Image (spheres, helix red, strand yellow):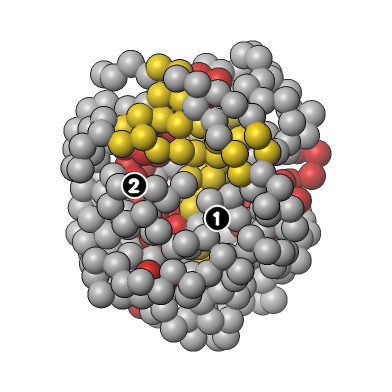
Amino acid sequence: MQKWVVVTQTGIGCLACLSVLGACSSDASPDAGASSSQGNGVDASAGNGGTTIDSGAAPGSNTSTPDASGTPNASEEAGESDALVDASPPSGPSDADATKSGYGGVAGLEDLSTVKKAPGCGMPAPQADTMWHPYTVSTPMTRVGPLMRTYYLKLPPNYDVTKPYRLIYQGTNCGGCPTCVMPFDTVAGPEGVIQVALQRDDGVHMTCFDDQDPMSIEFPFIEAADTDLRQKICFDEHRVFVNGHSSGSWLTNETGCVYGSAAQPGPSPPGGPLIIRAIAPHSGGLPASMPCHDFPTPGMWTHNHDDPLNPFSGTIGAINRALKVNGCTGTYGNSPTAPYAAPGTNGTCNIYTSCPKEFPVILCDPATGGHEGNKFYAGNWQFFTSF
């Protein structure tokens, strides 16, 4: 097991992305603007690929340092709703089964309904404001050798060092500023949320996440970030989520299928204890050769049918995998669904009703919106708070 060492820390909040809807939105920090082709011959704005091809895992280690940068973006109406779904409860294993074979009746799962405080609960806050602050971690074990990677941390107002908050990792499109992510703090209200933005600087593609390789260096990165964060801030290790758009959506699908519902060791040390409770990918896909496990991956997928950069078929593959491992019946197109009511989604979402209530699968598939539209983060927050 690697030992994580804090290197340095600064705390400079970025003023470059001050508008929630403004200059650093993924619309403005272009997906399409990253026009150079990446390894798979697809426009960089479509992530590292617009078709379901290879991607994968390899964990690493960590050290910690801050630099500077922005604030959030996005362009959907912010609102909250207490209603989770206007559908009948899905069938499947229930909490009663957890006592027999694991949470939700799945052997090998710890009780994810409980609160699991990170060791950082009670530690002094690493930053004193609600700006984004960067921290650098070392990932020595990657397929391209040692790398220094940066994640950005944003704490909620009046951060309570004893309160186990929900934590959301986020990834942006190719070329977008790293902290131009969906502003969950605007919809979290007094409950608060910890937000972590992952920077695309992997020594390979630079402008995109490494979102197509079976030994993706993003896995040691997110494990290193998780290990570092666990020691310094207070969050619930059973309520860690991932959200992303475009290349960040591929990353979201991949981290969900590797770390969903259970800590996994990964293909090389040091491995988890990272557990991803649920995901919310926007306009991405799931590569065919990911080293996915068979544990459930609850999720709320959003993908516009007219997306010209990442075809909708990429999300169909991710949905089919989720329906299978989550214990639902059927596949995309024939598994039963019902409307899922969520703020800002304009009636475009449906929940698969055969899935166990512990492991829901939701698909929002507007007919239009292209690659950039319909970022339903208010609806995603409602979904995340159901766990």
Front in this rendered view, residue 2 or 381 = 2
The residue carrying mark 1 is 177
Numbered badge on residue 202: 2
Q: Position of residue 258 (x, y in %)?
A: 32, 46
Cβ–Cβ below 8 Å for labels 2 and 1?
no
Side of 276 relative to 376 (left or right): left
- Mark nearer the N terminus (2 vs 1): 1
Instruction: Residue at 65%, 34% (x, y): give it.
Output: 12
Name which residue lies at 68% across and 54% down: 17
Q: CA distance from mark 2 to mark 1?
A: 15 Å
Q: Residue at x 45, y 31 (%)?
A: 136
Residue 3 in sight here: yes
Residue 111 visible in the picture: no
Q: Nearer the viewer, residue 258 or 261?
A: 258
**Amino acid on which disc 1 is placed:** Cys
Picture quarter containing residue 264?
top left
State whether residue 313 is above or below residue 24: below
List x then y, in percent, for residue 361. Answer: 48, 61
Secondary structure under badge 2? loop
Percent position of residue 103, x then y = 43, 37
Residue nearest the observer in this picture, 30 or 183: 30
What element does badge 1 sit on? loop
Image height check: is 93 above or below 100? below
Instruction: Indicate the quadrant containing the C terminus: top left, top right, bottom left or bottom right.
Output: top right
